[in-house]
Amino acid sequence: MTTERAPALDELIASWRDWMERRDALSVRDVDELESHLRDRVDALTAAGLTEDEAFLIAVRRLGSIDELSREYAAEHSGRLWKQLVLTDSSDTEGADASTGTMPFARRANGLAVALLLGVGAGIAVKATELLSGGPELVIRNIAVLVLPFLAAWFAWRRRPPAGTLLGVAAAFAAVALALNLYPFDGGSSSVTVAMQDSATAVLATIGSIVALWLVTGIVDAGGVWRSDRTRMDFLRFSGEWLVYYVLIAIVGGALSGLTVAVFASIQVDIMPFISEWVLPCGASGAVLVSAWLVGAKQRVIENIAPVLTKVFTPLFTLMMLALIVASLMQWNLVDGSRDLLIAFDLVLVVVVALLVYSISARDPALRPGWFDRLQVLMLAAALIVDIIVLVAMIARTGEFGFSANKTASLGLNLILLANLAWATWLQIGFVRRRVPFGRVESWQTGYLPVYLGWAAILVFAFPPLFGFA
C-alpha cells in the first residue's frame, strides 16, 4: 500500500486562502490577517514537534469564529484527511476575542443594498447622458466610462484598496473618457450619429475601452495587488461567473418585460416606449452591479455550475474547431471569405481562450491530469490550427485590399491569440505528461492579461489618429 505525499505547507495555505477570499464576508485584508494567525499557529505547532501538514490541520481547526467557513471548506474537499478534524464539534476558540468569542476581523454587512444603490447610480448616469446628448449614440461610445466606475466603487467598498490604486484607476478612466470624447471621430461634423455609423475607429475605440476599463477595474478588485497570479485568476474567475449571472438576469428580464408588454397591450395600453427607453438602458446598467453582488453572495451555486459549463462546452467547441479544419482542407476559400466570416472565427477563438481560462480557474490544482485535461489539449491544438488558417487569410486580404483599421485590429488580435494558444498548448501537453506543474499553466494565462490590456489601450488611443479617425 502506497501513501501519497502530503502537500507542501504553502500549497495548503494557498488552497485555504483561495477558498476564504471567495467568501463575500471577507475582504483581502481580512484574509491577510487570518493567514498571519494561521501561520503563527503552524509555526508554534511545528516547533512542538508536529509535521507541517499535521500543524496545518490543527491550526485551521483553531481559527475560532470562522469555523463555519472551515467546515464548508472541509466539506468541499471531502477527500482530504483533515476533513475528519475540522468537522468535529468543539468549543475551542483559542485566539478569539474574549468578549465576543470571534476573531478580530470585520464582517461586512450584506452588500445587496450597496450594489442596488450603485446600480441605480449607473442607470441614472446612462439615462442622464442620453437625455443631455439628445440620443443613445454618445452613451454607446461611453458605455464603459459611464457604468464601470460604479463597479469599481463596488470593488473599492469590498476590498478597501490603497488610495494610490484608486487614484491610478480614476486616472485611467479619465484618460479613456477624454480620448473617446475629444477625438474627432465625426470628421468635424456636429452629428454624433454620423460618427458612430461611419467611423470604424470609433467602434474599435468603444470595444477597446470596454476591455481596457474592465481589466483596470480588476485592479481595484485585487485590492491593489494586481501583480499576484492568484488575484488575477480570482478576477478572471469573477469575470466568468459575472457573465453567467448577467446572461441569466438578461433572459429573465427580457421575459418579464415581454410579459409586461403583452399584459398591458391586452388593455390597449402601449408601454413599449417606456420599456425600450427607460427600463432597458437602466436595467442593463444596474444588472452589472447586481451580477457582481450575486457572484459573491451565491458563490456556492455558481461553483456547482462552472465545472458543468466547462465540461459541456469544451467538447462542443473542440468539435467545432475540428470541423472548421476539415472544411478548410476540403474547400480552401477563407482567403475569399467575407470580413464578417473572419471576425466570426476570431470570436470563436476568443471563446476558446475564455473556456480554457474558466476551466483553469475552476480546477482543483491538487488533482492529477485526467481525460478533460487531454481533451483541452485537443481543443487548444485545433484552435491553434484554426488561428493559423485565419491569420493566413487575413494577411492575404490585407495584401490584396490594403491596411484598414478593422483589418489591422483583427490581425493584431490574431497574433496575440496565436502566441497565447501556442504556449498554452505546450504547457498543457507538459501538464498532461506530468512534466509541467499546474501552477505554470495558470500563471501563463494570468501573466498574459497585460497583453490584452495593452492591445485594448492601443485601440483606444493609437488607432483613431493612426487611421485618421476614419
Image: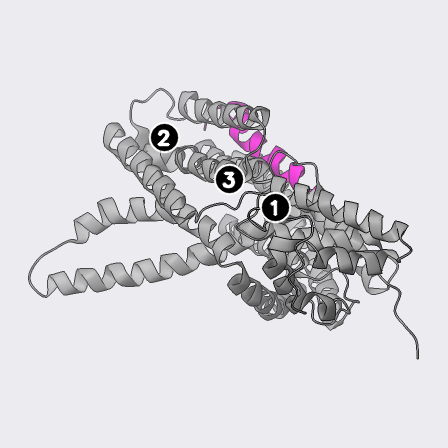
Which quadrant holds residue 219? top right
Q: Position of residue 157 (x, y in %)?
A: 48, 37
Q: Position of residue 102 (x, y in %)?
A: 59, 49
Amino acid type of the residue tagged 1 in the rendering: Asp
Disc 2 versus disc 1: nearer the observer: 1
Q: Residue at x 15, y 53 (%)?
A: 271
Tell me which numbered mark, 2 or 1, is placed earlier along the sequence.
1
Asked whether residue 358 is in view, the answer is: no
Left or right: 273 with respect to 334? left
Asked whether residue 291 is in view, the answer is: yes
Tell me which numbered mark, 1 or 3, is placed earlier along the sequence.
1
According to the picture, the residue beneath numbered tag 1 turns out to be 97
Q: What's the CA distance linking mark 3 and mark 2?
A: 33 Å
Q: Residue at x 66, y 37 (%)?
A: 451
Specify whether residue 466 is painted magenta.
yes
Q: Which residues are magenta?
A: 447-470
Quarter of the figure with the N terminus: bottom right
Left or right: 98 with respect to 381? left
Decide: is 86 above or below 94. Answer: below
According to the picture, the residue beneath numbered tag 3 turns out to be 155
Q: What's the CA distance linking mark 2 and mark 1?
A: 62 Å
Q: Residue at x 29, y 63 (%)?
A: 255
Tell me which numbered mark, 3 or 2, is placed earlier along the sequence.
3
Amino acid type of the residue tagged 2 in the rendering: Ala
Which quadrant holds residue 329? bottom right
Q: Are marks 2 and 1 in contact (CB under 8 Å)?
A: no
Amino acid type of the residue tagged 3 in the rendering: Phe
Q: What's the CA distance linking mark 1 and mark 3?
A: 28 Å
Q: Residue at x 75, y 55 (%)?
A: 59
According to the picture, the residue beneath numbered tag 2 turns out to be 195
Decide: is 383 above or below 89. Answer: above
